[in-house]
Image: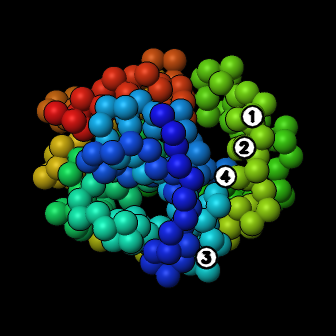
């Protein structure tokens, strides 16, 4: 299966995207960690494309090979999804979203429900309830502090390896080629954008009456599939288990031997669950 590497003008910038297959469009959204890009899904696209889906994974603004941007907000990244769909002439698409992008996908589905057919969430901690000893928003604040500590110097190749190892259960997946690609997406203008994102002020606090997103998942009109790693950070397994107990109807699954990079660690499980979900 050939994966084409393309560029397109969308939303006032130029976005780079990978495309494979034909059929119902599926937009793959990477997370916000240093080095994230559409390339995170290179191992996943062939199976989805072979199943009769048009797979599109793109570098969000400020990531990968897309043009740098002055706007480093999550809101701009969210708007880039619909801008890409408009530029490609897609009225409706499924969203497969990893890490922070899971929240972006859910927000798009809430704000523009006619544009989203299905949602697949991979390892998005902010869509999980806190444990009793945690406070709402605690995980997000901790992650923000971690990213600010990381934004002190451009990583070496060995530091890039350590960051990957921290997010992967299966370290054998870090081949020299994968490491070189991840490092290339972590340095230069990508590191500068990461530093700028890390310096963004925290968003305004929501009114106390607002429901957290995890309490609104069952209200989504679109079919929703959630997959979390058994060994992911921030008590993800315990919190995902709690979410399933609170909302038994949710289509939620736990991937064994899997940390935060769910598209890598749980490649087969993601395909086995998400392809029938998207094509039935």
Nearest to N terminus: mark 4 or mark 2: 4
Q: Which mark is residue 34?
A: 4
Q: Secondary structure at mark 4?
A: loop
Q: Residue 93 at what x, y percent from top left?
A: 27, 55
Q: Contact (CB < 8 A) between labels 2 and 1? A: yes
Q: Is residue 275 left or right of residue 42?
A: left
Nearest to N terminus: mark 4 or mark 1: 4
- Disc 3 vs disc 2: which is toward the camera? 2
Q: Residue at x 46, y 74 (%)?
A: 10
CA distance separating discs 3 and 2: 21 Å
Q: Is residue 55 shown to the viewer in this render?
A: yes
Nearest to N terminus: mark 3 or mark 4: 4
Quadrant in which the C terminus appears: top left
Circle 3 sits on which residue?
69
CA distance separating discs 3 and 1: 28 Å
Q: Which mark is residue 181?
A: 2
Circle 1 sits on which residue?
177
Q: Contact (CB < 8 A) between labels 3 and 2? A: no
Q: Secondary structure at mark 1?
A: helix
Q: Secondary structure at mark 3?
A: loop
Nearest to N terminus: mark 3 or mark 1: 3
208 and 116: which is toward the camera: 116
CA distance separating discs 3 and 4: 16 Å
- Residue 51 falls in image quadrant: top left
């Amino acid at each position: 299966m050939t994966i084409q590497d393309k560029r397109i003008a969308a939303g006032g910038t130029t976005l780079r995207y990978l495309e494979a297959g034909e059929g119902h469009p599926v937009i793959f959204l990477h997370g916000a960690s240093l080095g994230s890009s559409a390339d995170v899904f290179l191992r996943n696209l062939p199976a989805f494309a072979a199943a009769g889906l048009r797979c599109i994974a793109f570098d969000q603004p400020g990531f990968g090979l897309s043009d740098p941007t002055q706007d480093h907000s999550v809101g701009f990244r969210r708007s880039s999804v619909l801008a890409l769909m408009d530029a490609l002439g897609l009225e409706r698409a499924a969203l497969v979203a990893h890490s922070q992008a899971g929240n972006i996908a859910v927000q798009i589905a809430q704000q523009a429900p006619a544009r989203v057919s299905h949602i697949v969430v991979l390892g998005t901690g902010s869509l999980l309830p806190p444990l009793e000893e945690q406070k709402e928003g605690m995980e997000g604040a901790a992650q923000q502090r971690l990213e600010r500590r990381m934004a002190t110097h451009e990583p070496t190749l060995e530091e890039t390896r350590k960051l990957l190892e921290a997010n992967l259960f299966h370290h054998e997946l870090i081949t020299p080629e994968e490491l070189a690609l991840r490092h290339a997406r972590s340095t230069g203008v990508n590191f500068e954008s990461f530093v700028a994102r890390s310096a963004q002020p925290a968003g305004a606090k929501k009114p106390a009456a607002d429901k957290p997103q995890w309490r609104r998942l069952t209200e989504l009109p679109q079919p929703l599939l959630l997959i979390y790693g058994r060994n992911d950070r921030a008590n993800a397994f315990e919190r995902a288990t709690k979410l399933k107990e609170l909302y038994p109807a949710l289509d939620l699954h736990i991937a064994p031997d899997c940390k935060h990079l769910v598209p890598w660690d749980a490649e087969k499980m993601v395909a086995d669950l998400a392809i029938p979900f998207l094509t039935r």
